[in-house]
Amino acid sequence: MTIQTHSLRIFMAKLKTLREHDVYGSIEFHEFSRSKIEVETMLRPDFEKWGQSAADMLRLSTEAEHPRTRERCLALYMIGTNQTNATRWAKEIDRQNMTVHGWVHRYNEQGMAGIIYAHTGGPVPFLPGRSAKRSPRQ
């Protein structure tokens, strides 16, 4: 058996395994040479699972109420349309790699509920609609 044949058999076995276990995205053929084949599984948002499309994410990236939600929707749009991947997009927007990966994973698991921003820390304002940081003189 030649090196090429052996590498091809290993590649086909990896491909079959990836197809059986890949729940998040497409398979990219990253590098091909005579002696080595690497398969990379790309993390992608599953829009169909939630009855949405990339166009919906693009619209929400401009119309969502909170800037953090808009940022997350734009990330899902860019990653979901194969314009970039989560790692490159994190670098582009100066975020931690795992932050952007987390957005995609949460969207795939919870849909929009996983990426809509909700304030989770700090004190609750005494009066609704007023910031806790405002001094009484203002």
Image (cartoon, rainbow, N blue to C red):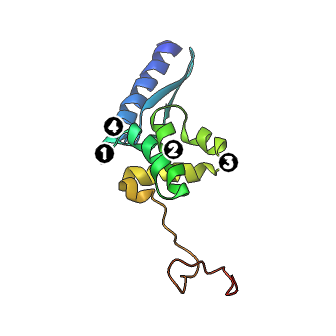
* Label 2–label 3 contact, CB within 8 A: no
Image coordinates of residue 136 in percent, x first then y, are 67, 87
Q: Quadrant of residue 112?
A: bottom left
Is there any visible trace of residue 45 in the rendered image?
no
- What residue is rendered at 67% in x and 48% in y? 94
Q: Which residue type carries mark 1?
A: Lys
Q: Which residue type carries mark 3?
A: Asp
Residue with the mark numbered 1: 49
Tell me the CA gap for discs 1 and 4.
17 Å
Secondary structure category for the residue under label 2:
helix
**Could you tell which of marks 1 and 3 lies nearer the N-terminus?**
1
Q: Which residue type carries mark 2?
A: Leu
Residue with the mark numbered 4: 20
Q: Which residue type carries mark 4?
A: Glu
Pointer 2: residues within 10 angstroms few (<14), some, or many (20+)?
some
Residue with the mark numbered 3: 94
Tell me the CA gap for discs 2 and 1.
18 Å
Secondary structure category for the residue under label 1:
helix
Residue with the mark numbered 2: 74
* Label 1–label 3 contact, CB within 8 A: no
**Could you tell which of marks 2 and 4 lies nearer the N-terminus?**
4
**Could you tell which of marks 2 and 1 lies nearer the N-terminus?**
1
Secondary structure category for the residue under label 4:
helix
Q: Nearer the viewer, mark 2 or mark 1?
A: 2
**Could you tell which of marks 2 and 3 lies nearer the N-terminus?**
2
Tell me the CA gap for discs 2 and 3.
14 Å
Is there any visible trace of residue 56 in the rendered image?
yes
